[in-house]
Image (tube, rainbow, N blue to C red):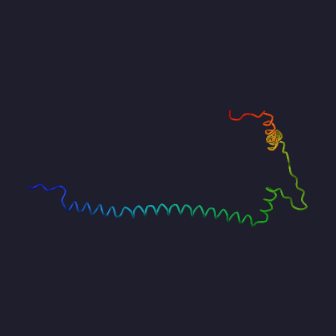
Amino acid sequence: MARRPQLTGRAAILAVVVCAIAMSLAYPVREFLAQRRQIAQLEQQQAKALTDLRSLEEERKRLEDPEYIKREAREKLHFCEPGAHCYGVLDDGTKTSASAGQRKAAVSPWYISLWQSVESADRGQGKKIGG
């Protein structure tokens, strides 16, 4: 029997056609996948925008309530209704507020520090910074 060649002309043409089809489909498939990725990103952005919208709607509803506005004015701005007796506590006696007050008293205002540094530089007694 005669031995057949392994690669015939028909097989070579079939391989070329299969490669051409694969090459022609590669770009549309890549674009399809890129579009699917973009759609997923846009859906995530839309979901985030909807949650932001809901929270803003809730805040708008709260701000339309006059009782909420009064409560916020009393708590954050320390407003007092006409005719009401309001008191403000300046020092609650905790150590944190006392130490903060001591630190404030120890630090002089910036303009005094600036003027003192100018005077000490004029006398030649300035501190050298950075070695």
Q: Position of residue 49 (x, y in %)?
A: 60, 63
Q: Residue at x 46, y 63 (%)?
A: 36
Query: Which percent across, then down, holds residue 26?
Result: 37, 61
The quadrant holding residue 70 is bottom right
Closest to the observer: 59 or 106? Answer: 106
Q: Residue at x 76, y 66 (%)?
A: 65
| Residue at image point 81% right, 34% down | 123
Corner quadrant of residue 5: bottom left
Q: Is residue 103 above or below residue 65?
A: above
Q: Is residue 94 visible?
A: no
**Whole-percent x, y for residue 57 in the image:** 67, 65
Residue at image position (90%, 57%) is 85
In the depicted view, which residue is nearer to us: 7 or 56? 7
Residue nearer the viewer, 69 or 12: 12
Tally of numbered tags: 0
Determine the image quadrant of residue 111.
top right
Q: Is residue 120 above or below residue 52?
A: above
Q: Position of residue 37 (x, y in %)?
A: 48, 60
Nearest the camera: 130 or 12?
Answer: 130
As drawn, is 49 to the left or to the right of 100? left
Residue 16 in sight: yes
Q: Quadrant of the N terminus?
A: bottom left
Q: Quadrant of the C terminus?
A: top right
